Image (cartoon, grey):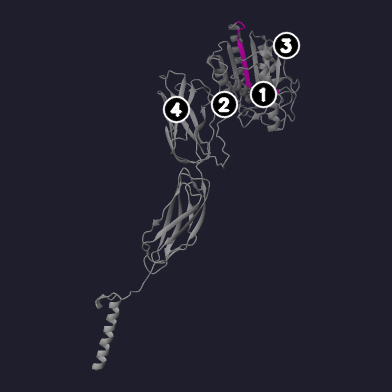
Amino acid sequence: MKKQFFTLCTASLSMIAMAQSSGVSKIGSLNIQKEVKPAVINLVEGSVRFEDATANNAIDANETCYIFMKVRNDGKGEGLGCKVRLRMTGRTTGITYSDISLPSISVGAEKDVRIPVTAGMNTQDGQVNAIFYVEEPNGFGTDEIQMTINTKAFVSPMLKIVDYAVTGSNGSTLEKKKPFDLQLVLQNTQHGVAEDVIVNVKFPDNVFAIEGDDSKSYHTMKGGEAHSLDYQLIVNNNYTASTIPVEVSIREKHGKYAENRTINLQLNQALASTKIAVDEIAVQRDEIQIAQIGSDVDRNIPQVTIKNEHSFAVIIANENYQTVESVPYARNDGNVFAQYCRQTLGLPESNIHLVTDATLNNMRSQLDWIKEVSKAYNGNAKIILYYAGHGIPDEQTKSSYLLPVDGIGNNTSSAYKLDELYASLGNIQAKCVTVFLDACFSGSKRESGMLASARGVAIKAKAGSVSGNMVVFSAAQGDETAYPNKGEGHGMFTYYLLKKLQETNGDCTLGELSEYITTNVSQKSIVLNSKSQTPTVSAASGLSDWRNIKLK
């Protein structure tokens, strides 16, 4: 027994000696290795994706994007001290990022991970390769993942009020104490995304917004995106100016990609009858179209300071008929022509009689007014008569008639005979009588088809006899149709009449006006309608120098 005990003690001493030689001085300092239970971090399959605010799958300049993944702890121990390591190669100018530390991940748990990537204003077009992985302190992290991402240089937005409309009921005018509607169109006219957009609209004192917010905000506006801002306004009797300035200020995130605008409304200006719906416009690069209300001739109407006190205009715009189909855009034709008479030709408001949807009695009454005016001015007055609406022929005599809104399409006794009109105008004493007829007398409608269902073919009606100091511009000749220009919201003839007045500030001769209208209407009708429309001009035989006469 003693021998065995000695041997055991000797062995124990040897172990102690070995422990001492390994740096352990006391037997009590010996450590017993515990069982290791590491975390094992894996990516959840299919969870890796790229997230960007503009949803164009690119890192845009001045944008913060995210690389998203979902990780899971498939090990036996808690995941502590894990980090996402990220590096990028390629077109990395202006792009910043950093490693991120992850919170603890329990056994079997999943965590959503979002790695922020921020691009500066100097980021360039190109691509970057993002290489990333999850590092676990014991070496049980994920493998490297690579992702190729497009980068986009900064593209500026540009916010503008691109158009506006002033509307009311029954083609009325803008008057004090009568509500009217103002529609503004806000659009991002460039391809860059505008952020934090704020629009403020300021009305002058004594002009009140019954409806509509004077401040509107939009989180983002994509390239081409447009919004309609709608207001109902009213002016009280304390407002003394004739012009109503509406100030629109626009701000966006950078404070440099927006244009302010002041819109000057005029008391007594004609009001359009309908609003236009404005929707967001989806666009690609190089395809932005400016949102517009109505036609280019309805905007930027030239304004003159002179007053032509001896010029008078009767404007009849017949659109809504009682027994036959309507004439598209006739009211707009008359309303806008009245604005040109006032603003461009310088006629005082009191010298302009605008009648929409005129009955036969209305039309006769306006002709009586012209006669009285001419008599009062002893032949020194200049007269303008404008008509937009239906014309009809007499099937037997081929005579032409203007159709009032209470007229019957196949009954000429309910219409105003063109020869009667010409005779009355030819007998008045005036410097010049200029007549514009945006109508045809073949029995056809402005758009297509025949006015009276019983009539199957167009009739070549007589043009009528012109006398006195009269010049007559007609939209079409013979059996042709006077077509609309749908894209512009006007009759084809009226559109080019207004366009010439706009381009020349109204300072053109009747000869120049005739050539412009005839050339453009003839060409455009063939292109748009595949049919001829040939405007004609007839002048009284005694008015040999009519080509040198001006409307102003």
Disc 4 to disc 3, C-alpha distance: 53 Å
Instruction: Select label 4 or label 3 by which is in front.
Output: 4
Q: Is residue 37 left or right of residue 408?
A: left
Q: As displayed, is residue 425 above or below residue 272? A: above
Q: Say which label, 4 or 3, has the lower sequence index.
A: 4
Instruction: Please give the residue where the numbered disc 3 appears in the rendered image.
Output: 541
Give coordinates of residue 243: x percent, y percent. 47, 20
Disc 1 to disc 2, C-alpha distance: 21 Å
Q: Residue at x 51, y 44 (%)?
A: 153
Q: Residue furthest front?
A: 21
Give coordinates of residue 168: x percent, y percent. 51, 27
Instruction: Please give the residue where the numbered disc 1 appears in the rendered image.
Output: 439
Q: Which residues are magenta?
A: 378-392
**Dominant SS type (magenta):** strand
Instruction: Select label 1 or label 2 by which is in front.
Output: 2
Q: Say which label, 2 or 4, has the lower sequence index.
A: 4
Quadrant of the snapshot with the C terminus: top right
Q: As displayed, is residue 23 above or below residue 358? A: below
Q: What amino acid is at disc 3?
A: Ser
